[in-house]
Image (spheres, coloured by chain):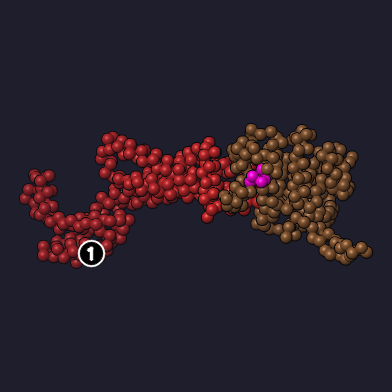
Chain colours: A brown, B red
């Protein structure tokens, strides 16, 4: 069974005897009435957020700085904890999760951060391989998986380069390759194009979109108006810790301005 | 097993990559252990020296006049039978008088021999001196008097116990200090690695997987530091012993020769322990998932 495809249920026949199926997209993420409060103040806090993201969706999180985009993503990989409400990711309730269960959860997702997070003393290949070695995978399997992941982000030709020798866009591609190498069903990206020029950023978004076409659920927090308007995917706009807009095929909109 | 070798490899790669931190940690441990080792050797030598000095104390047992020569071997045997006595030396009445007369030939002329049959005892443990003396004093039939330098012995014993407590206290303080310094150094080296650790956590590596290379690193730091300290101690010990022998030759008989191979091995072992404990302490504090 292909895990990436939605489940199809046979519904019946039309008048001309062609079959009708209902496609049920399994729920990937479900937040219900989630609040996060910080002692230091309201920046990045969330109040009473509910949302549902299904398998195979591509979601943009937009909103001004401090609206809670990063906090929302951190909730999903359990880097932050909900003060109230329930966070359900990949069928697991994170608010009750013990810290020993965090690593297995994170292995099911790829995480891409604004600052790339590559290890400076390792080559591109070693950086991506590190994600496999850290999970105790076999060298043979790693050598088989890596070219594919590097090919996807179009970095296969630079696999012996060190991060310092790469441009920002290339480094971010390597980071995405590392996030995708274990084929996680879910990819979270926090401002992946934040440090890049618009053209390079568009290239990064294309890589993420490509991964989405291969079946991964993708959530991107971004300020990249150009890409959001271009790709026409689901857009969730946050402001002051609340969801102010949730459109299936939205644009960047005006709420996200600071 | 596969990941175990990977982790050990990681630890060694890290040692090389963070060579500056490695040097800092190793030298810190080496200095701490050298201090502890030097102190331990000093207090050991002080202990040996006072023990040797104490063992030179003699107990003199003077027999009653009516004790016959035939009874001497039996008494000697009884004295030797007392536990805690290292040696028993018999000095006959005549021998004692002759020696006395040799020194003072004029004064002793024509005077009858007033000396007693005497035994000179050497002790194994000077602390038991007065106890043994009182046992022998109880032999009223044969023994007239038992003489021992109680005041001097008491003084020496007090010095010994003082040295023992001082040694334990200072040693413990030094060890705690060393542990703190070492754990701080390792915490620093963990801190310089926070980026890597963060990435590992993001990727979903298990905590033990993140910790083990750091732990192995701490262990290796400790072993290297211990070895370095062992070498330092061996060199310093060699020269100071030579120095003592040449400057105050009469003192050197109070000191024990030291098996430096043993000391070096102990230093490495303590270093390993220190490195392991220090890294456990700092790793545990630092690596917490939210």
Residue named by callout 1: B81
Residue A93 in picture, x, y percent from top left: 75, 59
Side of A120 where B30 appears, left or right: left
Q: Give the answer, above or below, for where B67 lies relative to A65.
A: below
Q: Nearer the viewer, residue B164 or A29?
A: A29
Describe the element under mark 1 as helix, strand or loop.
helix
Residue A226's image quarter? top right
Number of numbered discs on residues: 1
Side of B163 where B221 appears, left or right: right
Q: Residue furthest left?
A: B110
Q: Nearer the viewer, residue B97 or B266?
A: B266
Q: Give the answer, above or below, for where A84 lies relative to A196.
A: below
Residue A121 in picture, x, y percent from top left: 59, 38
Q: Does the rendering let one see residue A240?
A: no
Q: Residues within 10 Å of mark 1 (few under 14, many from 20)?
A: few
Q: Does the rendering let one see residue B85?
A: yes
Q: Which residues are magenta?
A: A146-150
Residue B247 in picture, x, y percent from top left: 28, 35
Q: Main secondary structure of the magenta part?
A: helix
Q: Residue furthest front?
A: A16
Side of A14 where B134 appears, left or right: left
Going 57% across and 50% down the picture, which residue do you hit?
Answer: A140
Q: Residue furthest right?
A: A15
Residue B187's image quarter? top right
Please say whether residue A149 is one of the residues in the magenta stretch.
yes
Going 11% across and 62% down the picture, which residue do you hit?
Answer: B69
Q: Nearer the viewer, residue B245 or B128?
A: B245
Label 1 resides on the chain identified as B
Going 42% across and 40% down the picture, which residue do you hit?
Answer: B228
Q: Nearer the viewer, residue A204 or B19?
A: A204
Going 39% across and 39% down the picture, which residue do you hit?
Answer: B232
Please say whether residue A58 is one of the residues in the magenta stretch.
no
């Amino acid at each position: 069974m292909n895990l990436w495809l939605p489940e199809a249920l046979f519904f019946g026949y039309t008048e001309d005897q062609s079959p009708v199926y209902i496609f049920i997209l399994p729920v990937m993420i479900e937040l219900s009435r989630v609040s996060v409060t910080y002692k230091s103040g309201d920046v990045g806090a969330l109040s009473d957020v509910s949302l549902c993201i299904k398998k195979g969706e591509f979601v943009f999180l937009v909103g001004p700085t401090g609206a809670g985009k990063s906090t929302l993503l951190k909730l999903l990989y359990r880097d932050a904890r909900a003060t109230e409400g329930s966070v359900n990711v990949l069928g697991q309730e994170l608010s009750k999760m013990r810290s020993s269960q965090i690593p297995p959860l994170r292995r099911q997702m790829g995480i891409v951060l604004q600052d790339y997070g590559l290890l400076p003393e390792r080559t591109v290949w070693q950086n991506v391989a590190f994600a496999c070695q850290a999970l105790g995978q076999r060298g043979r399997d790693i050598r088989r998986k890596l070219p594919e992941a590097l090919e996807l982000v179009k970095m296969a030709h630079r696999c012996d380069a060190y991060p310092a020798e790469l441009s920002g866009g290339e480094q971010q591609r390597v980071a995405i390759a590392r996030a995708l190498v274990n084929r996680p069903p879910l990819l979270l990206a926090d401002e992946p194009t934040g440090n890049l020029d618009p053209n390079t950023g568009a290239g990064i978004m294309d890589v993420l979109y490509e991964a989405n076409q291969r079946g991964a659920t993708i959530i991107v927090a971004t300020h990249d108006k150009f890409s959001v308007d271009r790709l026409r995917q689901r857009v969730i706009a946050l402001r002051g810790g609340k969801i102010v807009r949730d459109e299936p095929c939205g644009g960047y909109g005006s709420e996200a301005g600071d | 097993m596969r990941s175990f070798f990977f982790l050990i490899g990681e630890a060694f790669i890290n040692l090389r990559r963070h060579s500056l931190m490695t040097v800092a940690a190793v030298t810190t441990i080496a200095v701490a252990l050298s201090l502890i080792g030097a102190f331990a050797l000093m207090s050991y030598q002080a202990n040996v020296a006072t023990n040797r000095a104490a063992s030179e104390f003699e107990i003199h047992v003077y027999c009653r006049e009516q004790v016959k020569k035939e009874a001497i071997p039996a008494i000697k045997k009884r004295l030797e039978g007392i536990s805690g006595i290292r040696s028993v030396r018999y000095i006959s009445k005549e021998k004692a008088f002759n020696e006395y007369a040799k020194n003072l030939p004029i004064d002793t002329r024509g005077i009858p021999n007033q000396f007693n049959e005497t035994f000179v005892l050497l002790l194994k443990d000077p602390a038991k001196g007065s106890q043994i003396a009182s046992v022998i004093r109880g032999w009223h039939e044969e023994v007239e008097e038992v003489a021992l330098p109680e005041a001097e012995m008491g003084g020496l014993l007090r010095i010994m116990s003082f040295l023992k407590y001082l040694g334990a206290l200072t040693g413990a303080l030094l060890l705690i200090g060393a542990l703190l310094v070492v754990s701080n150094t390792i915490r620093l080296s963990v801190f310089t690695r926070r980026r890597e650790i963060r990435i590992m956590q993001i990727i979903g590596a298990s905590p033990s997987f993140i910790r083990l290379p750091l732990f192995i690193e701490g262990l290796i730091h400790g072993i290297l530091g211990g070895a370095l300290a062992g070498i330092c101690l061996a060199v310093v010990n060699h020269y100071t012993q030579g120095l003592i022998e040449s400057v105050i030759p009469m003192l050197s008989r109070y000191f024990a020769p030291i098996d430096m191979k043993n000391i070096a091995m102990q230093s490495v072992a303590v270093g390993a322990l220190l490195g392991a404990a220090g890294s456990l302490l700092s790793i545990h504090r630092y690596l917490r998932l939210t």
